[in-house]
Image (spheres, helix red, strand yellow):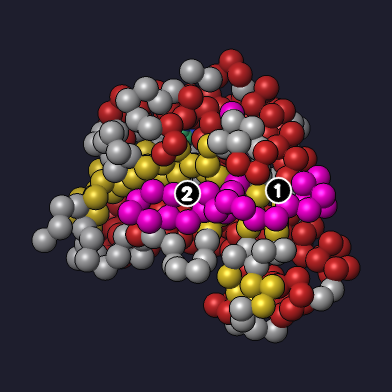
Amino acid sequence: MRQPVRIAVTGAAGHIGYNLLFRIASGDMLGYRQPVILQLLEITPLLNALKGVVMELDDCAFPLLSGVHATDIPEDAFAGADIVIMVGSRPRTVGMERSDLLTVNGEIFKTQGIALDKVASTHAKVLVVGNPANTNALIAASHARRLDPGNYTSMMRLDHNRALSRIAAHAGRPVNHVRKAIAWGNHSSAQFPDLYHAVVDGINANQFIHDSDWVEKEFIPGVQNRGTEILNARGASSVGSAANAAICHVRDWLLGTPEHDWVSMGIRSNGSYDIPEGVIYGFPVQCKGGQYSIVEGLEVTPFMRQRMDASYRELLWERDQVRHLMG
Ligand code: NAX
């Protein structure tokens, strides 16, 4: 029997948390032979709601679920964690500017970043989902002393999956015939969803679709604004697809990306594609043996450059708003 993997999830009683935990416990994330221990963090007023979620987890009698611990103390939730999925954050409320949200949520990621660096396993892998995800990940990583700051990532996978699905629909092919989409930059409407390197049935997607009007007027803004479209339709933000994207992100990071494909992850920039160091930016990556590496050498046209740089500039602006929270 394998040793259980300890997975800490913050915001565990929230909407995404509720859609995530059962899938992790069932084996969707780490495979159907890997036992897991869930270490769940919530704010104190939500502890009773979290207790209800734990009861439901118990009632599933998941064979792979070796233990569940619920707490409102970050150090308890992160103790010995191998994987940390940081969902917990405050939603934007009426009258709140993006800069207010950056500061309010940034405080959470400062406190929790310090706590997790103290007590998580030294090889812990961290995924930040809570928005503004890229900058929250940057704040948490800036407090890494024991842990590898390169192991702090943010979720671009929902945007990546949205791009794949849109390309497939427009090409009239099943989604598993499409590979190599990219969500560059920030998880915001300034991201750059890129189909110029994607392939459909082995043919370049742009050539396959051959409709630049659709690409520029529908595909790119459609992916950028999909979250708002869902919010307007559902009256609530993306939840099931967001939880699924978190599962995909961690699974591919740990278990590896398929051959001849890549995924998008928000990772520390290292100068690749002329995105200077100092931000967490969505790049195409391949993963093997629990490590990711940026897919290098893709062509960047002036049209792409403009969009990639705009997303970088937004991340710089966000970083300026939260400098006081960085370690
Ligand atoms: P909910 O408001 O349903 O859940 C958030 C949970 O976090 C709540 O239960 C709250 O009590 C908890 N929380 C707040 N502060 C906390 C703290 N200091 N420690 C622990 N828990 C805390 O929101 P939900 O729909 O689950 O969304 C969660 C986050 O995901 C939001 O920030 C949202 O914007 C973000 N998203 C990010 C996406 C991405 O692609 N990166 C897509 C989906 C989603 O919009």
Instruction: Between residue 41 and residue 296, name the one nearer to us.
Output: 296
Residue most toward the right? 213
Instruction: Between residue 241 and residue 326, name the one nearer to us.
Output: 326
The image's mark for residue 293 is 2
Element assignment for label 1: loop
Is residue 51 something that shows in the picture?
Answer: no
Residue at 31% from the left image edge and 47% from the top image edge: 7
- Does residue 291 show up magenta in the picture? yes
Q: CA distance from mark 1 to mark 2?
A: 20 Å
The answer to whether marks 1 and 2 mark residues whose Cβ atoms lie closer than 8 Å is: no
The image's mark for residue 191 is 1
Residue at 79% from the left image edge and 57% from the top image edge: 221
Range of the magenta residues? 278-306
At which x and y percent is residue 164?
A: 63, 68
- In the rendered image, which quarter is residue 311 located in? top right
Is residue 32 something that shows in the picture?
Answer: yes
Q: Is residue 158 left or right of residue 168?
A: left
Residue at 65% from the left image edge and 55% from the top image edge: 298
At which x and y percent is residue 132?
A: 61, 38
Report the amino acid beneath label 1: Gln
Q: Is residue 193 left or right of residue 127?
A: right
114 is higher (above) or lower (below) than 258: above
